[in-house]
Amino acid sequence: MSFPCLVFRRFSSTVAMKTGPSKQHFALPISEASLPKGFVATGLHCGVKKDATANDLAIIISESPRETSAAGCFTKNAFQAAPVCVSQEILRRTNGRARSLVVNSGCANAVTGEQGLQDAWAMSQETSHLYGAQEPSALVMSTGVIGQKLPISKIVTAIKSQARSAATRSLSPSASAWQEAAKAFMTTDTFPKIRARTFSIGGADYRIAGIDKGAGMIHPIMGPPVANRPLHATLLGCILTDAPVTPSSLQSALTHAVDRSFNCISVDGDMSTNDTIVALANGAAAPDDIPEIDEETAPDAFLAFRTELTNFAIDLAKLVVRDGEGATKFVTVTVKNAATYEDAHRIASKVSTSALVKTALYGEDANWGRILSSSGSVQGLSVPINPARVSVSFIPSDGTAALPVLVNGEPKIVDEVRAKEILELDDFEVCIDIGDFGSQQAKYWTCDLSYEYVRINGDYRS
Amino acid sequence: MSFPCLVFRRFSSTVAMKTGPSKQHFALPISEASLPKGFVATGLHCGVKKDATANDLAIIISESPRETSAAGCFTKNAFQAAPVCVSQEILRRTNGRARSLVVNSGCANAVTGEQGLQDAWAMSQETSHLYGAQEPSALVMSTGVIGQKLPISKIVTAIKSQARSAATRSLSPSASAWQEAAKAFMTTDTFPKIRARTFSIGGADYRIAGIDKGAGMIHPIMGPPVANRPLHATLLGCILTDAPVTPSSLQSALTHAVDRSFNCISVDGDMSTNDTIVALANGAAAPDDIPEIDEETAPDAFLAFRTELTNFAIDLAKLVVRDGEGATKFVTVTVKNAATYEDAHRIASKVSTSALVKTALYGEDANWGRILSSSGSVQGLSVPINPARVSVSFIPSDGTAALPVLVNGEPKIVDEVRAKEILELDDFEVCIDIGDFGSQQAKYWTCDLSYEYVRINGDYRS
């Protein structure tokens, strides 16, 4: 095997190196018409990253006359970074009415002690001043190296440059401003990750946009904010909509969506200290007479919104796996007919993180033995696997026929030519049918494990 | 980074390739004086492997006039291979009085259905005939490719060649016969793994010898035989002693030893379908008037034996990590001052399997951020980690001073020159002190994740 050298992957340090096949075709343009109303965005270089051409600070603010709702899901890592602690506290203090977010890349502000917390509060405070709020109400996210202090004065100076009166203000509702914001999220990402689209609920048209980042240290397990968490990197994402949603329902919908999207992806099985997904809903597109969408008072509208949010979050989450460090394959692992969703999810997660499965995917080897072995290694399922009922197949993404390799526990004679055709695709599905225990299904999205992954992570101090 | 090409790693297929630094210095000679009395061993080529110079069948038989006790720990994988099912059933049928074992490499006899079970029974039956037993009483182990049928007639022919009357019989108590047996366990191993030594209990001298194998798909979780398991790789190992031990106490001691040795190693985090450790104790060195060591009737002798067995098992287990596929480092991960042993063990296991930690070890990067992040990602600990109490240090194996990198949650300014000195060693320890919750400690043994690992496993159909 050789090293395909088609793409520069820019580290949050000054190093840049060639690695992996090109993923630029996933960097799609967005249309202004699909961007949510009432938000302004910017992305700029403030000096966290040494490379002056690389954006490292993003700000998004709601200017809607309606109150903006905010929600977040945060890493369950015991070592939550300072911005994770601060954002949770802000959601608590504002009762879910935060109206902006500020993000830096290049430094995770993790394991930075009391100073780290002060810096995260300062980022929030300065951003809040941009819209005249005295108390800090901007959600904060950071990504990059762990254990280093933020260059906070550079960040504060850059935030101040966005004041209404400043000649340097670049905050804008334009598509290009949103694109610059997306670039400021990037660390080892090879392309900016932004998507936007429209949807309708109850006859009203709304827009939703999202930005995320991540390529390594990707195996998030995120939950809603935890009350009274002691105040003491990385998947980051934000989802902005001009639909009107109450804070509690936005949190409920986001938790549901994250459980089925970002919590179902893995690049390397490593959970970060900074994983954060936040959502803002500013109601800017809502007709005046429409109340906020609420789980209790308008359950139909709520379910419609939650479905939209979930599908959108899945699309954003997949982008991270597409850009997985060193990844050459995008693989969907489906586990079906399990007794419980949790059983299915645990098996899918185990297969998706198996080094032997992931190297076999890289080697384009239809190695069902490794898939089976890793499925069987999950301990403590609610119903034990019955080996005689398990089937495994490879499903190509091009619409052609699936290839069964194991049926009811018996190996099939594999058509090696057909197996090779499927495994050479950039994108396919591994389907594990547990058999006769139930009807629950879980999907996981993963990538292969390549030389490049080892090279990137053997060299880079994250 | 370049590919150091010093060693041939022989696959159980016909392929052989150069990879990784030499590990031949771990292939130690054994002295006949330390081999347990009353056992004969052999290793030979019978034709499972295509390479006629590679051993692929081992037999060890107790010829002690005392009854031999047998015990085993077996993979908890749902897809237990046929030999795993058969060996458990034999222990049940004989009430722990099996007196021999037969092992093949090159084919795991896993996911082989009813035929696979018949083949495993045939191996046991033919081996039992060698010492005149009518019922199958030989423990069976297999390692190699999953999903392929055994060439059982070749194996049976080779077993028959060891009959007492046969001119071809090579079963012998000699050190060279034991060495040949150890070679027959090998698949991707680069050296045969055999150790032997002596110990004393109650004034009597005993001997203990062990053989194991494994280099990839190594993350065993093994337990004692499960009753009524449905009949329907790989770490393999056997431990033989001429001490007298009752079957139930041998099982109890082995379960304890395996929990603290083989269940604490990881090469790639993947649990096999075939993991098996068996022990035989034939009492051949016991004075006539000494009863069998028993947990209930002779607790002091039992504890002494269990300690010997555990320490010996740890030495054998470490050999597997030393020979980990692509490994260039042998790293001990110690978690101390945890609330419970299980908490400590789970954290140590998580750090030992983190792709980011393992690539950093390969890159000789003192990346404590990744160690911390992976420690913090363990969910559901009995007592949550308090980040402000956690300390991390690197401890060199050469007896020089430890290097603290994090103390009570605060990063230290790391002496990069000193860090480099330690991380360039082949062998060192990562110590994670959880702080103030308890006094429980767990150790895990792991290796780094290198290009070679990806190359070996991207090419090889296991």
Image: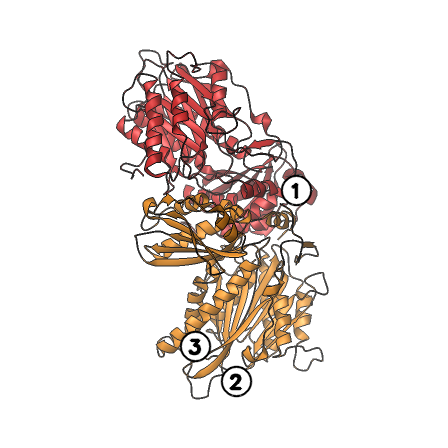
Chain colours: A red, B orange
Under mark 2, the amino acid is Pro
Q: Name the disc covering residue B65, or none.
A: 2
User: Is A134 drawn above or below residue A106 in the view shown?
Assistant: above
Image quadrant assignment for residue A160: top left
Image quadrant assignment for residue B376: top left
Q: Residue A333: in sight, yes or no?
A: yes
The foreground one among B448 and A337 is: B448
How far is disc 2 from disc 1 in space, using C-alphas?
A: 56 Å
Q: Which chain carries label 1?
A: A
* Tag 1 and tag 3 share a subunit: no
SS at mark 3 in the image:
loop
Q: Is residue B328 left or right of residue A261?
A: right
Mark 2: few, some, or many residues within 10 Å (few <14, many ≥20)? few
Q: Is residue A108 left or right of residue B238?
A: left
Q: Name the disc covering residue A419, or none.
A: 1
The foreground one among A360 and B423 is: B423
Instruction: Tell which tag, 1 or 3, sits nearer the viewer.
Output: 3
SS at mark 2 in the image:
loop
Q: In this figure, which residue is indicated by the disc labeled 3?
A: B246
In primary-sequence order, the first of circles 2 and 3 is: 2
Q: Looking at the picture, how far across and down is residue A298, in whole percent?
A: 31, 22
Under mark 3, the amino acid is Thr
Q: Looking at the picture, how far across and down is residue B385, in whole percent?
A: 34, 47
Q: Looking at the picture, how far across and down is residue B230, in whole percent?
A: 48, 60
Instruction: Tell which tag, 2 or 1, sits nearer the viewer.
Output: 2
How many labels, in total? 3
Under mark 1, the amino acid is Ala
The N terminus of chain B lies in which quarter of the figure? top right
The residue at 42%/37% (across/down) is: A148
